[in-house]
Each structure stands twice: as structure tokens, then as C-alpha cells.
Amino acid sequence: MKDKKIRDNPSMVEMNKKIVGLEGILKISGFLEGIGILKKNSSDKLTQVEELKRQMDELANIPDRFNEIFLPYGWIAYESMNFDIMKQAVDIATNGKIDDAEQILVNYYNQENMHWLLLRFMGVPQFRPRYELLQKACQDYLSERYHACVPVVLMMIDGVVNDIGQKGFFAEGTDLSAWDTIVGHESGLGMLAKILTKSRTKMTTETILIPYRNGILHGRDIGYDNKVVAAKAWAALFAVRDWAAAQNNGQKKDEEKKPEGFFEQIKDFANSLKEMEERKKYFEGLGERISKWQARVICIENDKKFCCEEGTPEKEVITILEDWKEKKYGKIAQKVMRFGADVQIKKMAGRIRAELEAKPLQTYKILEIVDEVPAVSEVKVVVEYQGNTSMENEIMVFRMIYEGKDGDPTLRGEPGGSWKVVNQFF
């Protein structure tokens, strides 16, 4: 249906129903308090419900407004997009300052935000083999080499979608819907694909502000080398990431799904409130711990007390090196980030064996440890192994990420997490 909005998504509608139900219950409690049956004051709760309704209206309407305003300019709303940035852009554009609004969006994709956005790719299987290439493209972007990163990002968009749907993002007729999502709504990714695949038949050197795939990859739009085009390409890729995650979770269109009964809704709502409160407390605590985090200053040569403590990235690197010594390639494979299925681990173990079996490790020494951010450290090691005719030395860099229970990077030391190798050190 053409007029169907994101706010009409089943989850949005269901949440509104639950909020209305909660308001009714609290009004009843307020009435009972007024006649002296309940002694506990409920007015504060009613105020909280009104604020919750206001927030829900905002959350439901802003994505629709965003797509209405910014889709023609090559932007769409998606689940992991910063909501405050989305709202700010809508507010500014509504006041007639579309250029200023676009600049807000472009500036969001800065060094700090790109670092964390990039790490989120590791939570989606189709992105993991592409991660190192995307890191290079990101470095090009942050170094203002837009001519280099834009084609790579466009190719990754096409490749990931093809992995999931057997047709590329830019192919005609590709289904880019995802049931009950923002990114997969009919005003979202599918409409963006139509804009980005616009036919570009003439060569032009004029500056463009939309990453037209055909014009760029076929050498017709020469003027794509700018930050606006690059930021929009990255934004489209992050949107594809959310779409891919939804597809992997089985969020196919399901018009036959029926709403649950009233009592089930109340039960689910109560459980959701409890879960949200617990998660809120956890993330508030996590944010506080992150704000207090400081990188370690480690001088290995001069620090006579230096040792690899349990739970540190360097301790995990030592474990990997010892596994190399003992030819336990399967154990090394398990320490490579997010290789879930056994067949994948076995395949990785075979690759590691092919690389390391002919290099029997003899000795090793840690040269440097750099804590980059709360979830990432690099450990530089010099190794000595038996070559074909003599002993050989080689410097290896292990890029370590602390992975939480959900598979996403998290603050080092969080319960249930572990250090994993991201780069192929071998």
C-alpha cells in the first residue's frame, strides 16, 4: 500500500496499544487513590505515561518524516541510525534549511562514530569476510580519499545483498523488504536502491551529491570525489547491515501473523518493561565504566615486573602462540572472531594449518602492546620459527577485540566476554 507508513509497522502499532492500555490502568489507579482505596500517589506515574506517549509518537513519526524529506537526497532512516541526529536533521529541514540538515548527517559519519559503526559489521556473518577491506575503505574515507572508498563501499553493498538474496542490491527486482522494520519498509531501502541505480548515460565532470552506482562504477560521473557522496554511500551500507541482520533473524514479511490476546499483551508488556529497565541499568553502568577507562601505558623493555595477566589481550596472544607451538590449529581457529559453525571453524583451522605447519614456532617475544579503545588492543610480537634451511624471524601484529556474549564488541573485562583475533595475523 502506497500510504502505509513506518508508524503502521506491527511493532509500532502494538506498542501504542500497550501504552494506551497502561494509561487506562494508571487512570483507574488514580481514581481509586482519589476515593481513598489506594494510598500510593499515582500522579507522577501518569506524568511518566504522558511523557512515554510523547516519546512514542516521536519515535513512530520521525522515521517517516525523515524518509519523506531526505529520500530524494539519497538518505533513509534505519534501525541503528542515531535517533537524535535523525530528529535534529528533520527539525532543521522542516525550517527550510535542507543544506544545513544534510551537513548534520554528513558530519555524523566522523572518525569516532565510524570506528564503532564499523565494529558492528562483525555481528553480521555476511560482513565478516569483508571486514578488513571495509577497514581500508574507512581509512580512505577518514583520510579524505573519497575517490578510493566510494567504489569499494558500493561494491560491498551489492555483494552483501547478493549473498542473502541471490541478487545484488542494484539488480532489478531485488526484494529489499524486511517485515516490521524501518530499513526494510517500502519507503526505505528499496526506494533508495531505485535512486542509486538511476541511469547515467552521459559522462559529466560536474560535482554530484548522490552516489549513483552506474555513473560511478561505469566511469560516467567523474565528480563523485566528495565527502557528501562518501557519507551517503556509508550510510547506505550501514542500512544494508541492519537489513541483513533482520534477514538473518528471519524477519520476512508475514501478513498472516495475528496479534496476541489482551492478557498476553499485558504480560509481554510487563516483561518488556522489566527487561528494558535491566538493560537500561546495565548500559548506564557500562557507559560510566567506559567513561572511566584509560589505556594502559606499558613499557615492556623497561618494566621488569611485566607479565601477561589473565584476561588481557596479550595473555590471549600468548595462548595462541603456545597453540602454534603445539600445532593445535583448531584451538587457534576458535580464537578468530565470530566463526560460529563447526564447519567454518574446521575450514579456518585448515587455512591456519596450511600457513603455519611449515613454520614450526620455536620462540616468541612481545614487543609492544597498544590499547586503542576500550574494546580493541594491538599486540606486536616477534616470532622465530624453523624455515626451509635456517631459523627465521618475523614480526606479527595481533589485532584483538573483546567480544561480548552477544557477539558484539564490548568493554574489556565485561562478564562473559573474551578476546578474539580480528586480523589474519598468519
Image (spheres, rainbow, N blue to C red):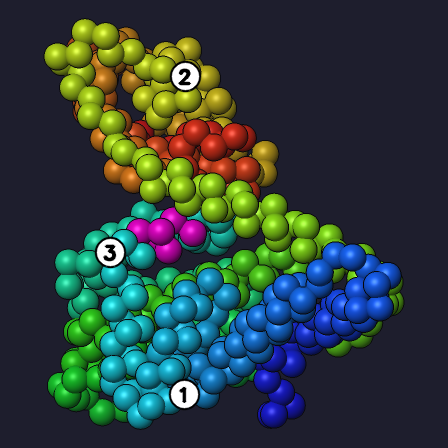
Is 224 magenta? The answer is: no
**Mark 1 → mark 2, Cα distance in angstroms:** 52 Å
Q: Kindly identify the residue that appears in the image at 74 percent across and 56 percent down.
A: 40
Q: Earlier in the sequence, mark 1 or mark 3?
A: 1
Disc marking residue 69: 1
Along the viewing direction, whichever of 43 and 360 lies nearer the viewer: 43
Label drawn at residue 310: 2
User: In the image, 33: left or right of 388?
Assistant: right
Q: Amino acid at mark 2?
A: Glu
The percent coordinates of residue 347 (x first, y second) are 49, 35
Q: Main secondary structure of the magenta part?
A: helix
Taking the spot 65% from the left edge, 49% from the top edge, the residue there is: 275
Was residue 119 drawn as part of the magenta stretch in this picture?
yes
Where's residue 83, x and y in %?
44, 68
x and y percent of residue 122 in the render?
44, 48
Numbered mark located on residue 111 in the image: 3
Q: Is residue 392 visible?
A: no
Q: Residue at x 25, y 68 (%)?
A: 107
Magenta region = 115-120
The reply to whether callout 1 and callout 3 are in contact (CB within 8 Å) is no
Amino acid bearing label 1 = Ile
